[in-house]
Each structure stands twice: as structure tokens, then as C-alpha cells.
Amino acid sequence: MGAYESIQNGRNGPALRVALVYMYTGFILFLLMGLLGLLMRMLHAELLRLPPQWYYRLMTLHGAGMVAAALLAAMGGGIAATSNRLTHDLRWLWTAYILYFVGVGLVPLAVLFGGFAAGWTIIYPLGVAYASGWTAWSTFAFLLGYLLVALGFAAYCIAMLQAVLRRYGSLSRALGWPVISGRAQPGEDVPYLQEVVATVVGICGLIAVLAGAAALVPYFAHNLNLTGLVDPLFVKEMIFLFGHTAVNLNIYLAAGLAYASLPAYTGRPWKTTPLSALGVNLVMIFVFLPYFHHLYQDFAQPVFLSAIGQFGSYGVGVPALLITVFGGLTLAYRSGMRWAVPTILTFVGFWGWVFGGIGAVVDSTIAVNQVFHNTLWVPAHFHTYYLLGAVALTWAYLYHLATELSGRHESRTSRLAAWLYGIGGAGFVMMFFTAGAAGQPRRFAVSIPSTGEQTWAFLATLFVLVLALGLLWLTYDLVTRLGPAWARARGRA
Amino acid sequence: MSGWAAFGVFLLLGAAWTAAWAFVAARSGGSPLGYEDVSRGAARVRRLLATPILLVLAVVYLVSLRWFPYPSFATQRLGPPSVRVEVRARQWAWELSRTEVPANQPVEFAATAVDVNHGFGIYSPSGRLVAQVQAMPAYVNRLVVSLPGPGTYTIRCLEYCGIPHHGMAATLEVK
């Protein structure tokens, strides 16, 4: 492969339009959910006062909405980044979008009108058969929303697997196994890394959806009085197997976008080598092992599963750091790279992925988890590798896509805005880490004075405003690029 | 391990990573070098880094096993518990079979719940989170812990359990 191949190939306009719809929908949703996050920080800073039920409603909506937004945008990026070599079945992709969209729409309905506030992880049996402060119909609406989102994601996974199979004929070739084993023939059509990522996400995504179904069935059955209490530990395992895997696949999808865009700025190819392909393939093992760390404090869980959780949590970081991030930094080092919004956000993305990963490894050490579990350390680390990792990488690609398609030039202010996103975001998450170390519980409507959380939340609010300033400018850029980008994807410009 | 000590380790590792990241960022836009040369150098650095990273992770993993909070490990470390406290969580209150326990001696808290998941979190008089365990229906989770020093400890719910969750608290006298 050359250093960089342009996104358009003359035939992929329809796929690019689907990708734009996915990514812009995700971006708008992200802005709205971010606003709710700001409100939550302001509530802890006591800059704003609302009854506690509203804190928990905002929390539920923010969590569910943000996960949905980030994943949808990364899914769109995955389509665009593979569309110049793969032929996607657009019916599946539109079906996935509609299911996903309707599912996501049910969530605010349940929260804002039904008062549903069980948190995005809805740990069974919360909100099923007990009076917890919200209406029964809202629980159904929320669960139905999740079901549709899961089905939408499954349809997407099927579409991606179809597309790679159409080109490579078998999953093993699409996963790059001939490259890894050194058996690839000279001139053989080997998959690009973003296509290997699409394959891995397709396979693991379908497994995660099965776990999600296993978790949702007891919820529905219990709500309809078809069963009594189902083993809550089992349901918890399934919830986290689904939730943890979906969120982590989002990160790998986003990393796949860097494979596709960074060569445009460094002039160097991000090749499918045995090592880089192995790094992506290892995700299939490591993405499933760490989820046990969500259940460390369930002492009834067999100890060996917790030990596997710690092993997997340590292990998952090694290929991510030494293969993917290291590969990205190598691609940029002394490349004479043009600093542009996508490269700044990609660098922010690498920083956040690893920095948040360090926070995750510390917390995944069971002895440490005793004092960090369910404190603000948890949102601290996942906001770091989400907001400053996966999401930053996704916006880097969205900006790259919209700029290339629209032919617009970026300004110095846009580059400054991208740095503000990173700086504001870093300050914001550091306040979370500090409050977590001080013992402030997460999912808690009030700040505990001994933890100093009110001060940390106040400082976090200021940092969020810095981030928001940068994001506002980037939003303006993205909105003004959409029209020409769409027209170009329709072949009109 | 105290939260602040872990925070210190985190800051140290985070600073090292940030320095490495900034080093690369500062040299990415300058005069270009051939990719072959860079790749060769990077492969050497990767090999140099891989061994110590894997070694440190393996050692920390093995050493940390001793500090598992699970009953068999805790009992081995602290000795058999002298006192057992039955803990029943319900929306939104704690029921403790006793509210007074000795300081600096292993105490067993057997936690369960009658409705939904709760988190049994013990905060020291100075506000530090000392230990925790989930209290969930259909299971009894046993936490063996030695509480460091006398005073009034606060029990807080650390697993979101419904709207009044943040008010679900109790006190424990440690003498």
C-alpha cells in the first residue's frame, strides 16, 4: 500500500453518506450528553442545585447516551475508513442505524418523562420489582431501547463481517492470519489494519450482543412476573461482559481510524505487518478477560475469576501500548508531520488512551480496587480513555473526513481549539482522579466534605469550560463542512 | 493500600508516559528522517521496553496476590476474625448485628441484601475509605478487615441503589 489512499474511490459515495450520518448523529448526541455531564459537575461543585432524583436521571441519561454516541460515531468512522476497499451492504447499515436511533430515542423518553434513573449499567435487580422512584413503563422503555441498540450494533457487525468476507473470502484471511504466520504470498491481497479491526469488532461485537441478550432476558422476564429473582451475580456478569466489551470495542474501532488517517499527515504507511496484525488479533482474547474486574468486590465470585480479571486487565494494555500506540508514535516521529486538527486530536487520543490505561491498571490491582472501586477513580479512568482516547481519535477522523470531502482549509484557531479540547479534558479528568483517590463515591448525588469533592468539581467545571470552548469552535468547523462534504459524497463537486 | 499511595504511583507513571509522548510530539513536525531508519530505531526501543514492562507487571501481579482482600487471603494475613458482624442492606438502610467492634483486630463483616445490590463501604473517622464489599441479594460476601484505630466510622452505600442512595449511611464504633 502507498502512504495514504484518499477516502473516495468514485464508487463509495453512498457508503460515505451513511458514514457521515452515523458520525454527525454521534457528534450531536455527544454534545448534548456532554452538557449533562457539565451539569453533574456543577451540581457537585454546588454551583447549581437540583433535587437528587435529577442528579440520578442526568447520570443515567449521560452514561447511556454518551456510550451510544461515541460508539455510533466510531461505527460510522469504521464504515468510511474501510469503504474505499470494501463493499458494504447499505441496507444492513441503514437498518442498523434506524434500530440504533430508535433505541437511543427511547432512553431520554424513559428518563425525562418516566423518571427512570437506574444508571446506564442498571445493575439487576435494581428497578425491576422494587420501588426505586421511577415508573414501571419507563423501565420497559429503557430496556427496549437497549434491546434495539444492541440489535442495531449486531446488524452493523454483520454488515462489516459480510463486507470483509466478500473481499477476503474467509475470516482467517480478513484477520490477517496469513500475514501473522508468514504464509502470505507475495502480491497477496492482505487486509489493511482498519479492515482487520472491522473483522475483530464484527466477531467480538456479536459475542457481546449475545451476553447483552443473556442479561436483558432476566430483566424482561422478571418485570413481566414470568420469573422471580434470577441469580443476580450471573446477570451482573452478563451486564459487564456486554458493557465492558462494547465500550472497549469502541476504543479499538477508534484506534482503527487512526490507522486510516495518520498516514495522510505523516506520509508514511501504517502497514499490516505480522506484529501490527497480531496486536489487533490479540484484542479478541484480551477484550473478554478484564471484565471480571467489575466484580472484584463481589467476594462470592470465585477468586480465580478475579485473578483472571487482574491478569486480563494488565495484559490488555501491553499490545495496546507496545504495538498500536507505539506504532502510531513511530509513524509520526521525525516524519515532518503537518500539525492539523486531526493530528492534534490523534495525539490527544494516544495520550488519553495510555494515561487512562495507567489509571485502569492501577485500579485493576485488586488490593487497590478495595479503596478505588465505585469511587470517582472509575469515571476518572474511563473518561480519560474515552473522552481523551477513543472519542478524540473518532473526532480526529471525523474532522479528517469532513475536511477531505469538503476541501475546506482549517485555521490556526481550529488547531488551537483542538489543543483546548485536550488541555481542558486533561484538567477535567485529573480532578476526577484526585476526588477518587480521596474516596468520593461515584454515582452519588452529593459531594462528601472530607473528600474535598466540591473543590475538585469546581475546578473540573472550569476545565470543562475550556474543553467546551475548543469543542464549540470545532463544532462550527464541522457544521460548515457538512454541506460540501455531503455534496461531494453525492458526486456533485 | 491507601488511595493516596496508589495515586502517587499513578502520577509517577503518568508523568513518565506524558514525557515520552511530548518527546515524540515535539519531534514529529520537524525535519523528516527516513522511515526505515525510524522503524529500525523504534523496534530497538520497543524490545528494550517490552522486557521491563512485562517483568514489572508480572512481579506486581504476583506480589499483589498476598494483598487480595478475599477472606482466605485476609485471614492468612491478619489471623482469624475475633468478631463477626452480620450486615443486611435494604433500600435505604443498613442493619448491623452489632455496632461496636474492636480496633486493630480482624473483624468479619458478612454482608447480604434483601432487595437490590448495595456496596458496604467503611470510612474512617478522618473520611478515608478503608475497605468495601458488595452486599447483594441471594449471596453472603465475607469481608475480613482490621480497622486501624478507634473512633466513629461511617458506613456508606457504594453501589447505586435508587434515588435516596446517597443518604444510606450508618455508624460503627471502633474501640
Image (spheres, rainbow, N blue to C red):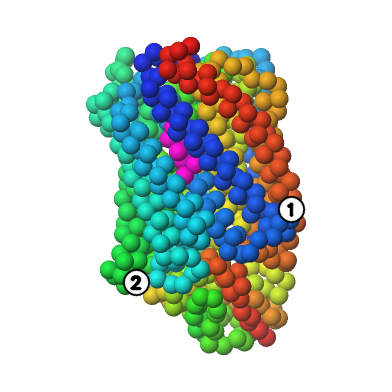
The spot of residue B43 in percent (x, y) is 52, 27
The answer to whether residue A399 shows anywhere in this view is yes
User: Is A227 situated left or right of B145 in this image?
Assistant: left
The spot of residue B70 in percent (x, y) is 48, 69
Host chain of mark 1: A
Q: Which residue is mark 1?
A: A458
The spot of residue A48 in percent (x, y) is 71, 57
Host chain of mark 2: A
Seen in the picture, residue A235 relative to B124 is either above or below; the reply is above
Seen in the picture, residue B55 relative to A6 is either above or below; the reply is below
The spot of residue A267 in percent (x, y) is 54, 15
**For the residue labelled by badge 2, is the local secondary structure a helix, a strand or a loop?**
loop
Q: Quadrant of the N terminus of chain A?
A: top left
Q: Amino acid at mark 1?
A: Phe
Quadrant in which residue A171 is drawn: top left
* Residue nearer the viewer, A47 or B82: A47
Image: magenta residue range: A68-76
Judge the density around disc 2: few (<14), some (14-19), many (≥20) Cα neighbours within 10 Å. some
Q: Which mark is residue A229?
A: 2
Seen in the picture, residue A75 relative to A317 is either above or below; the reply is above
